[in-house]
Amino acid sequence: MNGGDIFSTISALIGTMVVIVLTYYGSRWYVKRIARGQGSLTGGNHIKVVERLVVSKTGSIIIIDVQGIQYMVGVSDQNIDIMTQLDDLIVVPKKSEMTKESFLSVLKKFTPKENKNEKN
């Protein structure tokens, strides 16, 4: 190998690395820009997805906010069902405050409670 071949190989490698790094930081900037415009996880001006829990391969339980009224909705590939209207509104936490505990506590309100004193 002569000096010209090594130089062209190294410059091609450096150019490829620069393109990869710029693509990475450019996509991070774009995602932050898109997320900044939304008050909740996703949604438009009047409908916002407050929380989402995936329960199966094609099914999710979603809490949506429609102009201040929140609904728990079951979503699958074939069906969308409004499960209930929530009486206690869930405040959308800031990104640093997001936990799964708030959504799980809402789900526990709607699941049947087992009586531990029952004997089989």
Image (tube, rainbow, N blue to C red):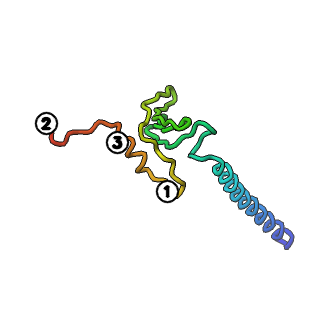
- How far apart, in angstroms, are the residues tagged by discs 2 and 3? 24 Å
Q: Earlier in the sequence, mark 3 or mark 1?
A: 1
Q: In the drawing, does residue 31 fall left or right of residue 109?
A: right
Q: Amino acid at mark 2?
A: Asn
Q: Residues within 10 Å of mark 1 (few under 14, many from 20)?
A: few
| Badge nearest the viewer, 1 or 2 | 1
Residue at x 47%, y 34% (from the top left corner): 71
- How far apart, in angstroms, are the residues tagged by discs 3 and 1? 20 Å
Q: Residues within 10 Å of mark 3 (few under 14, many from 20)?
A: few
Single out the residue that lies furthest toward the top.
Answer: 78
Residue 66: x and y in percent read 55, 35
Whether pointer 1 and pointer 2 mark residues with C-beta atoms closer than 8 Å, the reply is no
Q: Is 43 or 68 nearer to us in this picture?
A: 68
Q: Which residue is mark 1?
A: 97
Single out the residue that lies furthest toward the right.
Answer: 4
Q: Which mark is residue 120?
A: 2
Residue at x 73%, y 63% (from the top left corner): 17
Q: Amino acid at mark 1?
A: Glu
